[in-house]
Image (spheres, rainbow, N blue to C red):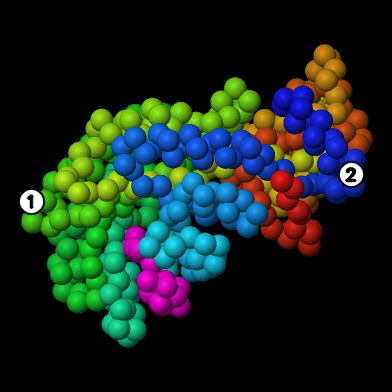
Amino acid sequence: MKNDLALKLHEIVHSGVKTPFYYYDTSLLERTLHAARASSDQYGFVLHYALKANSNESLLPLIRQWISGADCVSGNEVQFAFNNGFPSEGIVFAGVGKQDDEIDLALNLDIACFNCESAEEIEVIQQRAARLGRKARIALRINPGVDAKTHHYITTGLEENKFGINLWELESILDLVNSCDHIELKGLHFHIGSQITSLQPYKSLCLRINEVTTWFENRNIRLEHLNAGGGLGINYQHPDEEPIPDFNTFFSLFHRFLRLRSGQKLHFELGRSLIGQCGSLISKVLYVKKGLHTNFVILDAGMTELIRPALYQSFHKIENISSNGANLIPYDVVGPICESSDCFGKAVFLPETKRGDIIAIRSAGAYGEVMASRYNLRNLVRSVI
């Protein structure tokens, strides 16, 4: 962590802000948003912000300055996006299990599009739209059969996953859509996973999108938009070396390999790549417990504040910003929760650490605060900007 940021965090703690807390670097967030927009605008691509990554109300006005679209996966996210200034015509409602009242909410707000994931979902949206006298604009979420080569809990583009419509279902799905007078097919949606660090899966996705688009074209169906999802990863190992993802290479790959038809728009739903590096979880050392083979650093933050390491063994860089000693010692860095999985990292080399030291767990801007819980009746913690 850069010295000026470490000093700022110490000032925040010494001013009386209780640990743990989430710290957000809005300067880095703005530079990241600018980079994403500048790269995507070269090709006329349309960006949506995935609220599931982080829905902190203090950050949304800045995000909305650069990205007017919102990708939502619940009715509450749809309402939250609308309440926070995202226009209805930029809101897309995705998710494999939309409830009836959530569908009604989105229809009444006249959102841009529902991303539909099954035949029965289309039937239900047709029924709800007919009941309300509305027309529902939809995109079909297609399961492209592309392996994102990421953790199996966060890959979404294979037949074994719960998401999307399989390619062999398309004929019957199209017949269903054509029979629904309150459904308007606007596009196709694809999403292959999250924290994808290789561009090869995206190239494979482009080629599959071309095949599927041709299938519709051969049936004289014009699609207004294609949505290639998101999932672009960040550098968890070296956040200071690569604070902003390589958006230029990412978007240029889609420009090279995905064939858009005349008038067709390509949409993306970015979350982690925009917000992930901008946040850190700041904690204090409660105790250092020395064992025969393992030394434990016990923090006041736990899996209730950042569940990713416990949920799918994710890596986050951990830094002791109170000490810059050269003598590094391996510690298991753990939280106070009554679960053995409440561990941020094993054999983490830190300077000699003592009670009261301030620890920064980096790259926690995405899926940190938004996944927090009150397990063990812990309080939800604040964020500092």
**Measured Cα–Cα span from mark 1 to mark 2:** 65 Å
Residue 193: x %, y % from top left: 42, 43
Q: What element does badge 2 sit on?
A: loop
Name the residue: 53% across, 36% down.
32
Q: Which image quadrant for residue 192?
A: top left
Residue reaching furthest to the top: 326
Q: Is residue 378 part of the magenta span, yes or no?
A: no
Q: From the viewer's perspective, is residue 351 above or below residue 226? A: above
Name the residue: 24% across, 76% down.
182
Question: Tag on residue 15?
Answer: 2
Residue 114: x %, y % from top left: 35, 64
Determine whether, in the image, residue 316 is placed left or right of residue 10.
left
Q: Is residue 101 part of the magenta span, yes or no?
A: yes
- One can see residue 96 in this view: no
Number of other residues with Cα within 10 Å of mark 1, as a class: few under 14, some 14 to 19, many 20 or more:
few
Q: Nearer the viewer, residue 193 or 278?
A: 278
Number of other residues with Cα within 10 Å of mark 2, as a class: few under 14, some 14 to 19, many 20 or more:
few
Residue 195: x %, y % from top left: 49, 38
Q: From the viewer's perspective, is residue 220 above or below residue 232? A: below
Amino acid type at circle 1 is Asn
| The N terminus: image quadrant | top right
Amino acid type at circle 2 is Ser
Residue 113: x %, y % from top left: 34, 63
Determine whether, in the image, residue 378 is placed left or right of residue 266.
right
Residue that carries the numbered disc 1 in the rendered image: 218
Determine whether, in the image, residue 240 is placed left or right of residue 168.
right
Q: Nearer the viewer, mark 1 or mark 2?
A: 2
Report the span colored magenta.
Answer: 99-116
Name the residue: 82% across, 14% down.
326
Residue reaching furthest to the front: 65
Name the residue: 89% across, 44% down.
15
Q: Which image quadrant for residue 41?
A: top left
